[in-house]
Image (cartoon, grey):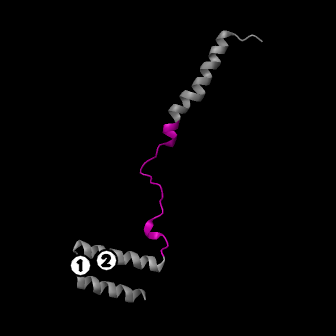
Amino acid sequence: MVLNIGLFEFLVIAVIVLFIIVPAIAVPFLTAKRGNQQKAKPSRSRRAVSPSRAQRKQEAKLKSLLRDGVLTQAEYENKLRLLRQRNA
């Protein structure tokens, strides 16, 4: 079967348009975020945390406040004692 050269050119152009140009134009529109949508991320605060880990985190926060000069040594020791009493 002998292909007409015009038909062959048409097929080549059709393949180029269908598989290269159309996807190149359509993909950005199809993957674009619409409006003000945000991906749902699991919040760190909602993760299950063991009590001992939570206590260590709170103690570390108190220690950083002491280091930054927000708390005095007496305030730090008082808050640390209260924290340990509450978690005991």
Residue 60 lies in the magenta stretch = no
Query: Which quadrant of the figure has residue 77?
Result: bottom left
**Residue at (46% x, 70% y) in the render:** 46
The C terminus - image quarter: bottom left
Q: Position of residue 6 (x, y in %)?
A: 64, 11
Q: Is residue 11 above or below residue 24?
A: above
Amino acid beneath label 1: Leu
Mark 1 secondary-structure assignment = loop
Determine whether, in the image, residue 81 is placed left or right of residue 16. Answer: left
> Residue 54 falls in which quadrant of the image?
bottom left
Circle 1 Cα neighbour tier, 10 Å, few/some/many (<14 / 14–19 / ≥20): some
Which residue, given by chain and number where applicable, does mark 1 sit on?
A: 71
Whether 32 is among the magenta residues is yes
Percent x, y of residue 72: 22, 80
Q: CA distance from mark 2 to mark 1?
A: 8 Å
Q: Which residue is mark 2?
A: 62
What's the magenta bit mostly, secondary-structure-wise?
loop
In the rendered structure, are the residues bearing label 2 and label 1 in contact, judged by CB atoms less than 8 Å apart?
yes
Task: Measuring from the top left, give residue 44's x and y in whole percent.
Answer: 44, 66
Circle 2 packing at 10 Å, graded few (<14), some (14-19), many (20+), is: many
Front residue of this view, candidates 44 and 85? 85
User: From the viewer's perspective, is 12 left or right of 84?
Assistant: right
Magenta span of residues: 27-49
